[in-house]
Image (cartoon, grey):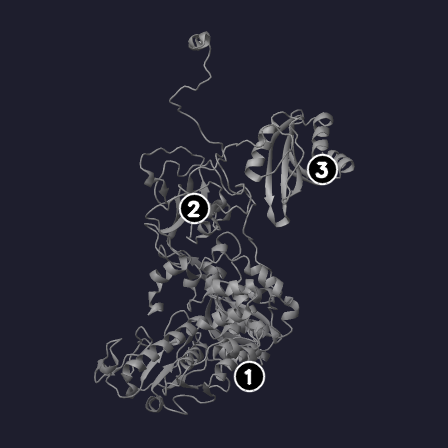
Amino acid sequence: MNELAERLARRYDAEGWHEQRKDLASISIPALRVRDVLAWLRDEEGYKHLSFITAIDNIERGVFTLTYTVRNHDTKHSLMVHADIIRENPVVDSVHLLWEQAWTYQRELKEWFGIDCPGSPRKDEEFVLEGWDQLPMMRRDFDSLAYSNATYAERPGRVTHDPAAYMKAQLYPEADQ
Amino acid sequence: MDIKDFIAPFAVWKRAFEKPFTVKKPIDERPGAPRYRGFHINDAQKCIGCGTCEAICMNKAIDLVPAAGYAAKEGDSGLRPRVDYGRCCWCALCVDVCPSGSLGMSNEYVWIDSDPEVFRYTPGVEAKPWDGSPLGYRRAEGYRLLEEQRVEMPELDYKEAVQTFLELVRGYSRQQAEKEADRCVSCGVCIASCPAHMDIPGYINAVREGDMQNGLRLLYETNPFPEACGRICTHRCEEACAIGTGGDPVAIRWLKRYIADQVELADYGKVLPRAEADSGKKIAVVGAGPGGLSAAYYLALLGHSVTVFEKDSEAGGMLRYGIPEYRLPYPALDKDIGYIESLGVKIERGTAVGSAVALAELRSRFDAVYLSTGLPAAYSLEVPGDKHPRVLDGVAVLAAATRGEPLGLGKRVAVVGGGNVAMDAARTALRNGAAVDILYRRRKEDMPADPDEIREAIAEGASLVEKAIPLEVRDAAGAIAGKQALFVWNEARMVQKEDGKRPVPEAIPGAVHEDPYDSIIAAIGQGPDLSFIGEADRLELRRFKPVVDGFGRIAEAAAGAAAEPGAPASASPSKAAAVFAGGDLVNDRKDAISAIADGHHAAQGIDRWLDRKGS
């Protein structure tokens, strides 16, 4: 597999090959080369199957890390291809012409992260959220607690205890005297 | 109407005999994936109720609630997490962060009930069908959101350390301290285990924020010996640390030291409070150890005039005369004491109560008296020959080392005992060039000394002889007669005599050893010296301990009868000032932080008693 890493590095400036398991590795590529790399992996290296596409909000670095997981069924090996795109303008090439089912994942990326894949079919339609008008919910700056508080009623009867205060009351209440 | 509208319903009949795509109901089996994130499970025995799961939950889906069968105790809040599935988003951050690893998720996701209130329960406490499920989500092996390992403390090399009395522990840098402080989850479970109940999460947060002045202020709220305790505290808090349930506990003691080390004594006054007004009351404190000076500090803050009477030529008690300077350098101790004196506390050094001044005189000159005289009298070996001139008292050896006196221990030294005094005596002997055997009647794991002290003593070259029962000390024969002593001891085996109690050493018949030593240092414990309390003082003692009430006030015996502990001041049979006591003299913990806590507590008690007396 290291030969594949070397080829990816030489052809596409890929870096950071990491063997997570014997049958699973990951590598990072420049976002501009996403379609080239995936086409080459599919056509030249036997990674014919797109397992899924997802993203990670690395807010500290100001990027979304896209993850394309492809599989070579002959070698029973999966490869996660990572590519960073800036959060401020999250746009990446669509890969639906390589794998038709990619449009579903790309529609999901649009709804949950706000990541746009121009040309991807039905990308702007609602995916699972109906009438969502907030920040995309998988962005880490989406305040899920504020949303929950504003949207749902507080369940009556809930009460919590601070461990230190509770232990003080139970074990050494005289400290307050 | 279009003709198609009539025909369309009949068109579906063409599929009437095909295999349907629908699923047959009821569906019996629909298991989640092996690592599916389903309903929570919790090993409630392993959980310590730290609330880190609640703190990390993004949706406030977790409450900490009292749980039947789990009472609060040291290291366990007695609370357990309750999950509200109206809010849980199944992200499993609670599982990933759980310090003890008790929290998990089953792969069960089907739960049907018409009552919405049931979808809130305490996993591991309220029984559910998925309890004990091996499937579901657990924190992956090796994956931790929390840092398991503490930042290593820089120390002198042991070979170098044993050549000198320089401080062994070097202290954290700012970067190291902030990194270590970042490991704390601020749960506060540790606070109950600290005898002084210090605001540990508060001052660790001050380290994290680089706010040393606030850190110092928080330390002094409950402990005026941060330099000393930052070095030699028995750190029971660390035994209760939530992070310690799955890794190294947070280095709470070293972080306390870090704060105190960062602030110059000259700047203390800018941060710490002072008395607002003079109360006009005078308090005498007997003993300038940590307990006595703690009482003096808090009494001074309350506006009282405090005079401390100390029999030795320097203040500090066992912190100075019982702990070698490689563990607690004198400048660090002097800084703590210096600040207390800067508040106007007078320390009468070299003034022994009982000989230089009588307790009765203090009771007539002062409005209240606090006794914190500790345990200065060493126990003897209690074997034949224990008065041999080469049998020395461990505390006396350490005190002589503090005073800079020649120790004359010789080249081969036996230290008998397993406590901190024994370890310190052994390490002092090593620093004086001796080969040292530490002989202890039980096993290493039974030794009452701080594990760090045991580890360091052995690393510095002391040899530990476990299960050694002292039998006799004899004068050596021949050319070394009078210069060496023969230490006779019996090998022992550990015997479990009673279930639930620790095993006891039992001598192995015939396994008797005789070893010659230049010095045999007995360090098997100390007792109080209450010779300064006379019968005329009418203070009630029981088993060599003053009998005190909740505020540390000693009961006073009426003519022929003991006063009820806690009786109001007006019931006092004596017109002399009330006497309070604390520290090793009273409590069984016998460590500096307990004495400091007692001093603080007694200061509050004395203040209330004076208030009541004056009204």
Q: Quadrant of the C terminus of chain B?
A: bottom left
SS assignment at label 2: helix
Q: CA distance from mark 1 to mark 2?
A: 69 Å
Discs 2/3, front: 2
> Which x, y percent locates residue B155?
62, 66
* Residue B300 location (% of width, % of height): 42, 82
Q: Residue furthest left?
A: B560
Q: Pointer 3: what residue?
A: A32
Specify which label sits upstream in the sequence, 2 or 3. 3
Callout 3: SS: helix
Mark 1, residues whose alpha carbon is within 10 Å: few (<14), some, or many (≥20)?
few
Which residue occupies the extreme right position in the image? A10
**Amino acid type of the residue that numbered disc 2 sits on in the rendered structure:** Ala
Q: Residue at label 2?
A: A150
Q: Amino acid at mark 3?
A: Leu
**Callout 3: residue from which chain?**
A
The image quarter in which residue B478 lies: bottom right
Q: Which mark is residue B403?
A: 1
Whether residue B465 appears in this view of the structure is no
Nearest the eye: B523 or B302: B302
Residue A153 seen by the camera: yes
Q: Is residue A31 above or below residue B210?
A: above
